[in-house]
Image: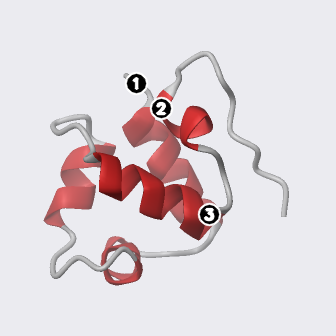
Amino acid sequence: MEKFGEKLHLLRTKHGMTLKELAEAAGLSAHGYISELESGKKKPTVEFVIKIAKLYNVTTDQLLRDDVKLNLKG
């Protein structure tokens, strides 16, 4: 799970989203939490991981497991 923030940043930028846009899409009122996740300062909640997996059409394994690569097609 060490690479979660790196993967989140990659997905967000690949989809052309700002921190604020991702926060809104994830139902958050502010983007600070996402910034801290991307920088590795915080660990994600289960609910957040599920929202991100659905939003970007990836699996929770792809997000959480460092040995599983992201599917960046489409």
- Amino acid of disc 1: Met
Residue 72 lies, in percent from the top left, at 76, 50
In the rendered structure, the answer to whether residue 64 lies left or right of residue 68 reads: left
- Amino acid of disc 2: Leu
In the rendered structure, the answer to whether residue 2 lies left or right of residue 10 reads: left
Specify the label residue 60 is tagged with: none
Disc 2 designates what residue? 64
> In the rendered structure, are the residues bearing label 2 and label 1 in contact, judged by CB atoms less than 8 Å apart?
yes
Residue 37 lies, in percent from the top left, at 26, 46
> In the rendered structure, are the residues bearing label 3 and label 1 in contact, judged by CB atoms less than 8 Å apart?
no
Disc 1 designates what residue? 1
Which residue is painted at 58% across and 64% down in the image?
54
Tell me the quadrant of the picture where the C terminus can be found: bottom right
Depth order, front residue of 67/10? 67
Which numbered disc, 2 or 1, marks the residue that appears first in the sequence?
Answer: 1
Disc 3 designates what residue? 56
Q: Estimate how packed mark 2 is, as few (under 14), some (14 to 19) or many (20 or more) residues with alpha carbons within 10 Å.
A: some
The CA span between labels 2 and 1 is: 5 Å
Point out the residue furthest to the top here. 67
